[in-house]
Amino acid sequence: MYTYIALFLGINVGGRHRIKMTDLRLLLKDLGLEDVNSYIQSGNLVFRSEKVDTSELSEKISAAIADNYDFKPKVLILKKEKFVWDMEANPFPEVESDDRRLHVFFLAEKAENPDIAGMEEVKNDSEQFELTENAFYLYAPDGVGHSKLVSKLDRLIGVPTTGRNWRTIRKIREMANELEKLVTL
């Protein structure tokens, strides 16, 4: 049995593509996923499954939502170990305490030709970023709501992303750790 994190792109944002987390948890349980738990309304779930193929899990969840709602969201599924690895790869550990301004944008796939020069051009002077194979890390001291870089990020990277602030990232890891503790008791 594996522990997974599901990150949904664009649900419950700006009043669009609304799904109650209680309904989403029930939907995933109906798909045979176990110990499903959610964090806040923006689509962060932790669950367990014997399935190994994250692409298959993603498609299964996305299709089930499309069958029950009027949209088909992109769902990024990460094994807990991968999620934790991406956390530990944070290039800005000195600002982890500023957990609402430090963000990780998980990439749906590897960025083949990201426009780094374009990112440098549109970023605010106070922003710092780093792109890795799996994630885009952004420290935005003025907040992401004021970031031109964030508004153009998917286009500049060339692949869909879904971002979470450091506070949410820590909470998701905590939930995944707790789930594994419960299962081993």
Image (cartoon, helix red, strand yellow):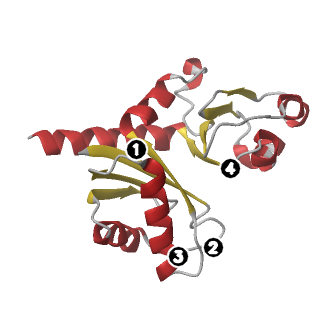
Q: Position of residue 11 (x, y in %)?
A: 57, 65
Q: Which residue is mark 3?
A: 66
Q: Nearer the viewer, mark 1 or mark 4?
A: 4
Mark 2 secondary-structure assignment: loop
**Residue 160's mark?**
4
Viewer can see residue 46:
yes
Mark 4 secondary-structure assignment: loop
Position of residue 182 in the picture relative to residue 22 (left or right): left
The amino acid on which the numbered mark 1 sits, given as a three-letter code, is Ile
State the image quarter where residue 16 is shown: bottom right
Mark 3 secondary-structure assignment: helix
Q: Real-space Cα distance between discs 3 and 2?
A: 18 Å
Of the 4 image quadrants, the one containing the N terminus is top left
State the image quarter where residue 28 is shown: bottom left
Q: Position of residue 68 (x, y in %)?
A: 47, 81
Q: Real-space Cα distance between discs 4 and 3?
A: 19 Å
Q: Up-down: is 16 above or below 47?
A: below
Q: Which residue is mark 2?
A: 15
Q: Which residue is mark 1?
A: 172
Q: Real-space Cα distance between discs 2 and 4?
A: 20 Å
Q: Real-space Cα distance between discs 1 and 4?
A: 21 Å
Q: Nearer the viewer, residue 129 or 28?
A: 28
Q: Up-down: is 136 above or below 70?
A: above
Mark 1 secondary-structure assignment: helix
The amino acid on which the numbered mark 4 sits, given as a three-letter code, is Pro
Of callouts 4 and 3, the N-terminal one = 3
Residue at position x 58%, y 65% in the image: 73
Of callouts 3 and 2, the N-terminal one = 2
